[in-house]
Amino acid sequence: MLGNFSYHNPTKLYFGDDSLKFLNDELKNYGDNVLLVYGGGSIKKNGIYDSVVEILKSNGKNIFEDAGVMPNPTVEKLYEGVEIARKNKVDLILAVGGGSCCDYAKAVAVSANCNEDPWQKYYIRFEEPDCEIIPVGCVLTMVGTGSEMNGGSVITNHKEKLKIGHVFGDDVMPKFSILNPKFTFSLPKYQMVAGCYDTFNHICEQYFSDDDDNTSDYLSEGLMRSLIKSSRDAVVNPENYEARSNIMWTATWALNTLVAKGKSTDWMVHMLGQAVGAYTDATHGMTLSAVSLAYYRYIMPYGIKKFVRFATEVWKINPDGKNDEQIANEGLKAMEAWMKELSLVLKLGDLGVSEEMINGIADATILLNGGYKKFDKNDVINVLRASL
């Protein structure tokens, strides 16, 4: 393990089927004004909204609502939330929903007291907050992003055709997150499997970098194997508590910065997927699944040792009598078979992407260099075309 690093994660987690009760303990640490952030209203149908509001009221909180957070939160929605937070001088932002709600809450948290345009400051210039940050708490109802235990926040600007993530520091991470696997039971299969793949790809983005003997890679392999099994079980029985709890816990550890330690990390699949999302507004996990196989086949020759390890350790491919390329290809074929089993989107065309959009998507793709091949625009175009 060759990397030098520090590690600190300030988020406190409450996990399990009675975890919501601990919201009472956390609310004592904050002022009276709470901004309740949620999405399209599903939490009102399944009773989670009523449970949360009852706890807030029993603790004497003034509740201000910011509903309608979309799956890919927009800059316009961010401006709206900032106004609500400012007007009501909120002391805590409580996000009740999936990763988009958590991402959005963090964006509002760093923007409400900011004297500049937050889109320009945080998502174009990638500056850090120099203003007071409103604390954020999360009650998770959908898993995949890991946003409940990291500083990431992704915002979409449709006018500029950009979808950009900013990973903020410790001060922006949720102060606490409540993870009840039962809250994910009512999620439609499409959203559930998209979250599973988002989780899987988070691990891959960190795993497919560097070639040293790194403890982080061993952790990643275990997480991937757990997710593969649990996702299969959950597709068969969506209310399999053990499977859903394992998926939820894996999603958190996939992106709470632990398995990135000692790694350069890649993240080009996410850059490709986010650019596709800016053009199509498609579900995030599906934009990743649509480009992943083409991307990994494209970079495989440059990181063949790790792809062989991926095949043998994650997918249990028998290496006897095969060369490295054959082993690596069998690993990716096993991954593709699992993706088909989950009914994930495997082609960009299924998300509405056409050949005419490729150049624009390539222009919107941020180029990173932590993976096995440093990409330029031509590489991006090649992968996108192979994904159509």
Image (cartoon, rainbow, N blue to C red):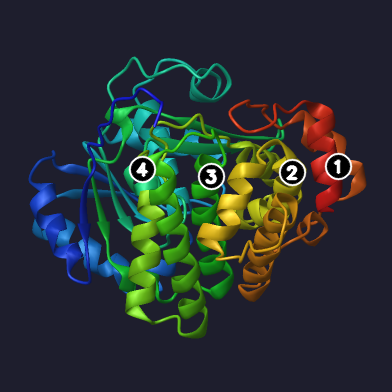
- Choose mark 3 or mark 2, whichever is in front: 2
> Which image quadrant is residue 45 in?
bottom left
Question: Of marks 3 and 2, which one's residue comes earlier in the chain?
Answer: 3
Asked whether the viewer can see residue 254, the reply is no
Q: Which residue is mark 3?
A: 73
Q: Earlier in the sequence, mark 1 or mark 4?
A: 4
Say which mark, if any, is on residue 279: 2
* Image mark for residue 256: 4
Label 1 to label 2, Cα distance in Å?
Answer: 8 Å
138 vs 248: above or below: above
Q: Could one spot residue 264 in this view of the protein? A: yes
Packing grade of label 3 (10 A; few <14, some 14-19, many >=20) is many
Residue located beneath label 1 in the image:
357
Q: Nearer the viewer, residue 315 or 143?
A: 315
Q: Identify the secondary structure beneath mark 4.
A: loop
Note whether 86 is above or below 136 in the view shown: above
Q: What amino acid type should be assigned to the residue bearing mark 2?
A: Tyr
Dot 4 or dot 2, earlier in sequence: 4
Residue at image location 36% in from the left, 40% down from the top = 150
Q: Quadrant of residue 211?
A: top right
Residue 79: x and y in percent read: 49, 33
Query: Residue placed at 67% from the left, 52% from the top?
Result: 287
Query: Which residue is drawn at the image coordinates 23% and 62% (left, top)?
Result: 52
N-terminal of the pair, mark 3 or mark 4, is: 3
Distance from Cα at disc 3 to Cα at disc 4? 21 Å
Q: Position of residue 365 (x, y in %)?
A: 71, 32
Q: Quadrant of the N terminus?
A: top left
